[in-house]
Amino acid sequence: MRPPQRNDSQLISARPVAIDSDRSSDRRVGTLIITEAWEIDSANTGFGGYSAMALLDERRFLLASDTGLLAGFTLGRDGRIDRQFIAPPPAGPGKGNFKVDRDMEALTADRARGQFWAAYEHSNQIWRFSRGFARSDGHVAPAAMRRWHANGGAEAMVRLIDGRFLILSETTGARGGGGTAALLFPTDPVESPNAEPIQFAYDAQGRGRVTDAAQLPDGRILLLQRRLSLVDGFVSTLSVAHVDTIRTGGIWRSQTLALFSPPLVTENFEGLAVEDSPEGAVIWMISDDNLTKWQRTLLLRLLLPRDAMPTARPGFAAVP
């Protein structure tokens, strides 16, 4: 009996996939337009399981997996992949020998400073990394997250444009019942570990579990939710909510923007990233293949047209 052969290939490929099995010409989903759909793959045995995503530059991505591995690449409009890599981060919770040590479920960035923050399940910790993920310069286990479920902890994390941090759990119930636990920190929790966050609850209203979040150019929060249906398989919903409606002990709700279900291309979408463009807000979604052979790593490019957004808040688009 030979041990399984490990493949450390650094090559990543992309191929276009059909957007709609019934109406290939129809690319509208709610108020969004699907402009690109790609299947991302690699022979590397550690590739896959991506639950988080950040944009480093236009069409340059950083992915973080359930096993703690990172993958980076630039995707050309023709599907060509450049400057790719697959590697572990320099540090993290535990020794990194097991999935529970480094289950990275959320990723957010300050592109101007080149800093990254990663949220880990099981340990319920937040780690901060320097430019290029060269090193970790701090981490924290927030007191408000210590009782979050080991496999249902921080699933979405957003560094807001004003420097606050929004963190939503996957399955941990909020105190008092109704919705899942969520936090809004007044500043970087790694920099200010004693800062008290606003504790509230997010009510998904039947859309499923929150798997990621990002901030739109108009200031609203974009939420990705996913549920599993026996009939339709994975069903994903994008919704929007206003951060200024968050209240201590309150219930936070959102409004549906788009629903992804068959015959549209569907998968276990868990990662989200947003960038501003002259056309409007460009939204990227990545799926988690759970490191299985029967699921895919799909990357969708969506457009929220500028005329479908409220007027952007002054100065937002000018900030990286």
Image (spheres, rainbow, N blue to C red):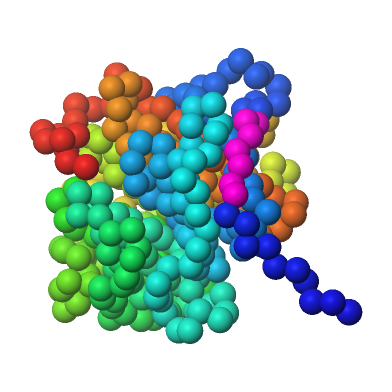
Image location (x, y in percent) of residue 140 = 28, 78
Q: Residue furthest top?
A: 25
> Which quadrant would residue 79 be assigned to in this image?
top right
Residue at x-position 19% and y-position 34%: 317
Q: Is residue 13 magenta?
A: yes
Q: Residue furthest right?
A: 1
Position of the C terminus by quadrant: top left
Position of the N terminus by quadrant: bottom right
Q: Is residue 98 visible?
A: yes
Residue at x-position 23% and y-position 34%: 218
Residue at x-position 29% and y-position 19%: 307
Residue at x-position 53% and y-position 39%: 81
Residue stretch in magenta: 11-17
Seen in the picture, residue 186 relative to 299 is either above or below; the reply is: below
Seen in the picture, residue 38 relative to 214 is either above or below; the reply is: above
Q: Is residue 192 magenta?
A: no
Asked whether 82 or 38 is in front, the reply is 82
Asked whether 25 or 10 is in front, the reply is 10
Asked whether 133 or 151 is in front, the reply is 133
Image location (x, y in percent) of residue 56 = 34, 46
Q: Residue furthest left?
A: 314
Image location (x, y in percent) of residue 265 = 63, 34
Q: Is residue 142 visible?
A: no
